[in-house]
Image (tube, rainbow, N blue to C red):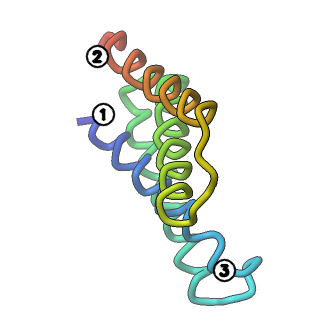
Amino acid sequence: MSWAILVLAGLVEIVWSQSIKPTENFTRPVPTIICFVLGATSVYLLSRAMQTLPVGTSYAVFTGIGAVGAIGLGILVHRDPLSAGRLAALAMIIGGLVLARVTNPE
């Protein structure tokens, strides 16, 4: 169950990362509130996962999911540049996430 919560925390982090820009430097009240709620939710879920998973593994997986999701959405939605180097970086992050999961003693 902790791994499911951790994945959910990472997915919320992806949405949170995309909610920052619409705040326009935290000058728009509704987007700012949404951003803070998403950020707090992702950290709360991370803390729940850390009750049974190692802190280092949890945080690495959490940030890895967030990074892959943010880069992926940047490429797909915001037309961020795509290069062989970025694809290799994404592949290494995903490989690290898989390795962290399969080598975890839980």
Q: Secondary structure at mark 2?
A: loop
Q: Dot 2: few (<14), some (14–19), or many (≥20) neighbours within 10 Å?
A: few
State the quadrant of the N terminus. Answer: top left
**Vertical arrangement, residue 55 with respect to residue 104, above or below:** below
Q: Dot 3: few (<14), some (14–19), or many (≥20) neighbours within 10 Å?
A: some
- x, y percentage for residue 33? 57, 80
Amino acid type of the residue that numbered disc 2 sits on in the rendered structure = Glu
Q: Residue at x 58, y 46 (%)?
A: 82
Amino acid type of the residue that numbered disc 3 sits on in the rendered structure = Thr
- As drawn, is 24 to the left or to the right of 20? right
Residue contact at pointers 2 and 1, CB within 8 angstroms: yes
Q: Dot 1: few (<14), some (14–19), or many (≥20) neighbours within 10 Å?
A: some
- Say which residue label 1 marks: 3
Front label number (2 vs 3): 3
- Say which residue label 2 marks: 106
Q: Earlier in the sequence, mark 2 or mark 1?
A: 1
Q: How many marks?
A: 3
- x, y percentage for residue 91? 48, 27
**Vertical arrangement, residue 82 with respect to residue 104, above or below:** below
- Say which residue label 3 marks: 23
Given residues 95 and 30, the one toward you in this image is 95
Q: Earlier in the sequence, mark 2 or mark 3?
A: 3
- x, y percentage for residue 81? 63, 52
Label 2 to label 1, Cα distance in Å? 10 Å
- x, y percentage for residue 56? 55, 23
Residue 17 marker: none
State the quadrant of the C terminus. Answer: top left
Amino acid type of the residue that numbered disc 1 sits on in the rendered structure = Trp
Given residues 92 and 52, the one toward you in this image is 92
